[in-house]
Image (cartoon, helix red, strand yellow):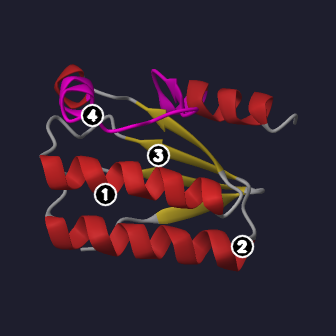
Amino acid sequence: MRIPILKLHNCLLISIQWELDDHTALQFQEDLLNRIHETGANGVVIDLTSVDMIDSFIAKVLGDVISMSKLMGAQVVLTGIQPAVAITLVELGIQLDEVFTALDLEKGLEKLQQELGE
């Protein structure tokens, strides 16, 4: 099952609605990078509200997706991070330097627009 990636103006919006397995996470990584390339999007909001837990592989893929998106010129905002996900990311040492976060999708979009100067 693929994760939908929506385009809104110059941004991509992703709301992950189920727990990720390894295959879905890798497919998401490829799909997102292709969409950034195709659309020229300069912002990405990834909403994790429905994700209660992640394992080490998914955490690494998430960190990689953020780094790769930045390399392609897209600012990333993570929203809706659950406590267990935050704990896992920190305990695994996943580097999320210069990644903006927000409590929900609405605040994430506001933060992204602010950072992009819109």
Residue 14 place in picture, x, y as percent: 47, 53
Q: Quick one: label 2 or label 1, which is nearer the N terminus?
A: 2
The mark tally for this picture is 4
Q: Does the magenta stretch include residue 94?
A: yes
Q: In which quarter of the image is the N terminus?
A: bottom left
Q: Distance between the residues labelled 2 and 1?
A: 22 Å
Of circles 3 and 1, which is in front?
A: 1
Q: Which mark is residue 93?
A: 4
Which range of residues does the magenta coloring cover?
86-106
Classify residue 11 as left or right of residue 89.
Answer: right
- Residue at image mark 1: 61
Residue 67 is situated, as x and y percent measured from the top left of the image, at 51, 53
Q: How many other residues sit within 10 Å of disc 3, few (<14), some (14-19) or many (≥20)?
A: many
| Alpha carbon distance from label 3 to label 1 | 13 Å
Q: Which of marks 1 and 4 is nearer the N terminus?
A: 1
- Amino acid type assigned to the residue bearing label 3 in the image: Ile
The label shown at residue 112 is: none
The image position of residue 102, as x and y in percent, is: 51, 23
Kind of residue sitting beneath label 2: Thr
> At 20% from the left edge and 35% from the top edge, which residue is drawn?
92
- Tell me the distance, in whole angstroms, between the alpha carbons under discs 1 and 4: 13 Å
